[in-house]
Amino acid sequence: MEEKAKLSVEAEQGDKATILIVNGRVDGSSVGILESAVQEQINTGNKTLVFDFKDLSYISSAGLRALLIAARLTQKEGGKALFCALADHIAEIFEISGFNEILDIRATRAEALGSI
Amino acid sequence: MGKSPTQVLVVDDEEDLELLVRQKFRRRIRDEDLKFLFAHNGKEALEVLGENPEVYLVLSDINMPVMDGLTLLSQLADSEKDIQAVIVSAYGDMKNIRTAMNRGAFDFLTKPIDFNDLEVTIEKGIKHVQALQRTLETRDRLVAVKQELDMAREVQMSFQPDALPANEHHDVKAVIIPAREVGGDLYDFFYIDESRIALVIADVSGKGVPAALFTTVTRALLRATASKDFSTPGECLTMVNDLLCENNPSCTFITLFFAVLDLQTGELSYSNAGHNPPRVLRADSRVEVVPKTGNIVLGIQPTHTYHNNQIQLAPDDTLFLYTDGITEAEDSKSVEFTESRLDERLAELSGASSERVLTEVVDAVQEFVGDAVQSDDITCLAARFLAPLSVHPS
């Protein structure tokens, strides 16, 4: 089986937002890691989250659902969730599923931070 | 109503143990906390146990006519029921006591019996038996839950016929190869009226019973909407989406492609709610991607308008619907099957029956995956348009 964890989420505290760098595969078996990382930020009062997807290799429908929940949670707290630096094949998943219409997607991290 | 009393069987050929028990426990017997049954040898004891399945604790003497206590112990050990026995023996009769313990006796008492010792031992036996009962009940409940899950899968599968009765106008078949858990894939096909058939494929986020329930509800809503106030697939999805969004706190969603094939004209009208773009396999071997309608998955965005689009099927063209269980199937090195492998395989299947298209695609995927574990449902549907239906003017 796989030797290294297939998903890691690293948090970086910025001035206007917390950056979550998502590295690896988000699917049914790893989505819990992403969910708890989001919940941890919400619990500590960080309600504006920028998901940096430059190292995201795959996302399943279970992962998309987690992003949607993250967007709703941050909104409820009066903040927001942004998603940036999607690889082409990830952008395609967002486009096919229509999630690009309901999630705030930005080309780069700088653009995401600039929009806040 | 109180709970029924715990039952204990006392086996002794002499009267003294019975008298002792009746006297010692008279209050608890009267309060219906304990109930004692009596037998006078091993054989009688087995008969009493056979007639009283609620008895799990036996208090037995060793020396008795017809069948002695040690033989009774062996018989109990061989029975399917987990009956616990406390053996009563003469003081100092270590040989028999050892034999009894080796044959699975739970505890022993020595004669002359000490009242206090008797009560403590019986109490201990009852607690032990009750703990065993709870374990068994838990196990039975787990078995029942598993059976219910298996049944849920069977019910889910039984909703899905594997083919629409074929005729000279169409050849529609589908296949679903479920992963280990009750899955979230769905296909469906049905007549809307005598000249139009509905074709559906869908994939719900997540797995297990919640996913299965969501697909079942979606299917029912779609069928009801499509056959009642039918207008276009886009309008149907708009209605179904609003209904699914009404109460969906868990953010479960479903990707779904819904098409209606007009058998008179070969026109395919469709709407795509975030599902992988299906393919049209043309009679001349071209494989075309069915253009998107730019719509989001169902269940998330209320009042979203689902668009409608049309493409034309000619005789011997096949519409191929699939879920990502095909394109994202992985081999042991985590390489995906991908759309391009699917398109390559489809291109070789022009002119084939729907049955053959499905078999060949599934075989190709399974051969590619090899020994790797199938992690997602594999579902596909092939709908071949054969010849236009002519309408008889009424």
Image (cartoon, helix red, strand yellow):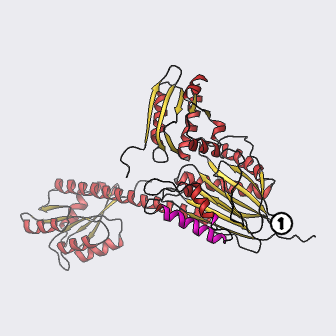
Q: Position of residue B242 (x, y in %)?
A: 71, 44
Q: Position of residue B16 (x, y in %)?
A: 18, 66
Q: Quadrant of residue B23?
A: bottom left
Left of B164 or right of it: where is B373? left
Q: Is residue A22 visible?
A: yes
Per the image, the residue denoted by label 1 is: B264
Query: Where does the C terminus of chain A fall, quadrant-wise?
Result: top right
Q: Quadrant of residue B71?
A: bottom left
Residues shaded magenta: B347-368
Which residue is painted at 80% across and 66% down in the image? B263
Q: Position of residue B66 (x, y in %)?
A: 20, 80
| Label 1: chain letter | B
Q: Is residue B304 above or below residue B118?
A: above
Q: Is residue B250 visible?
A: no
Classify mark 1: residues with Cα within 10 Å, few (<14), some (14-19) or many (20+). some
Q: Position of residue B107 (x, y in %)?
A: 18, 60
Q: Residue furthest top?
A: A15
Which residue is painted at 28% across and 74% down in the image? B46
Q: Amino acid at mark 1?
A: Gln
Left of B143 or right of it: where is B262? right
How many numbered discs, if any?
Answer: 1
Q: Is residue A51 above or below residue B299?
A: above
Magenta segment, principal secondary structure? helix
Which residue is painted at 71% across and 51% down in the image? B291
Q: Residue furthest right?
A: B394
